[in-house]
Amino acid sequence: MPAKETYTFDQFLQDVHPEHIPFVMENHETLLGQGYGLKVDLAKSGYVVSYKDPKSKRVLLNYVFRKTGMLFRLYGDHFPTYLDVIQSLPQAMVKQIGKQPDCKRLLNPASCNSSCPMGYAFAIGDAQYKKCRYSCFLFPVNAENIPYFKTLLEKETAARAAA
């Protein structure tokens, strides 16, 4: 069996749009400083970079590439503690949440694998959402979204540290 190829953060960084490198680097340095583990893989559409929580061993965030560009995926395990932030997201981000698939386990627990982590149920305005944890907070990286990513990331890391 051939050895699995390893990829580096610097290789990933070469594919990041120059405009987004400061954002990615700031998060990278902050998360490594907080003890988060880094993993860089290569998927069909590009690199997948993951940061794993040192306490729970659960992934905090991914950067993934799609045809449309780089995406930021937050695993909001503690989202109820900062629901006010989620409810204040700009309309474009709320629309993106609405497009994501619903969580099968939240809708009908028998319709999904029992080992799959439950998704997220919450409201923004009058709209109710029951979204899969793997796609709920998956957004394109762009200048408009970056300030919100920073806030969401700060809130989630603080909640994880306090847990």
Image: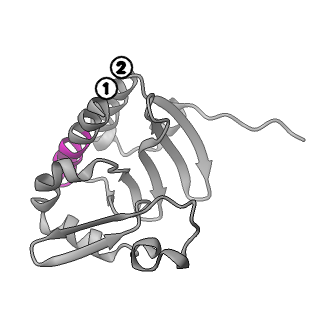
Q: Which residues are magenta?
A: 143-153
Which disc, if any, is residue 41?
A: none
Residue at image position (22%, 53%) is: 80
Left or right of residue 9: residue 78: left
Q: Quadrant of the N terminus?
A: top right
Name the secondary structure under disc 1.
helix
Which disc, if any, is residue 33?
A: 2
Residue at image position (40%, 24%) is: 32
Tell me whether the residue at label 2 lies in contact with that at label 1, contact meaning CB atoms closer than 8 angstroms.
yes
Q: Position of residue 65 (x, y in %)?
A: 47, 55
Name the secondary structure under disc 2.
helix
Whether residue 82 is situated above or below residue 56 in the rendered picture? below
Q: Position of residue 66 (x, y in %)?
A: 47, 61
> In the rendered image, which quarter is residue 127 located in?
bottom left
Which disc, if any, is residue 30?
A: 1
> In the rendered image, which quarter is residue 151 located in?
top left
Q: Position of residue 29 (x, y in %)?
A: 35, 24
User: Nearest the camera: 37 or 141?
Assistant: 37
* Magenta-colored segment: predominant secondary structure: helix
Q: CA distance from mark 2 to mark 1?
A: 5 Å
Circle 1 crowding by C-alpha within 10 Å: few under 14, some 14–19, many from 20: few
Left or right of residue 89: residue 21: right
Q: Is residue 101 magenta?
A: no
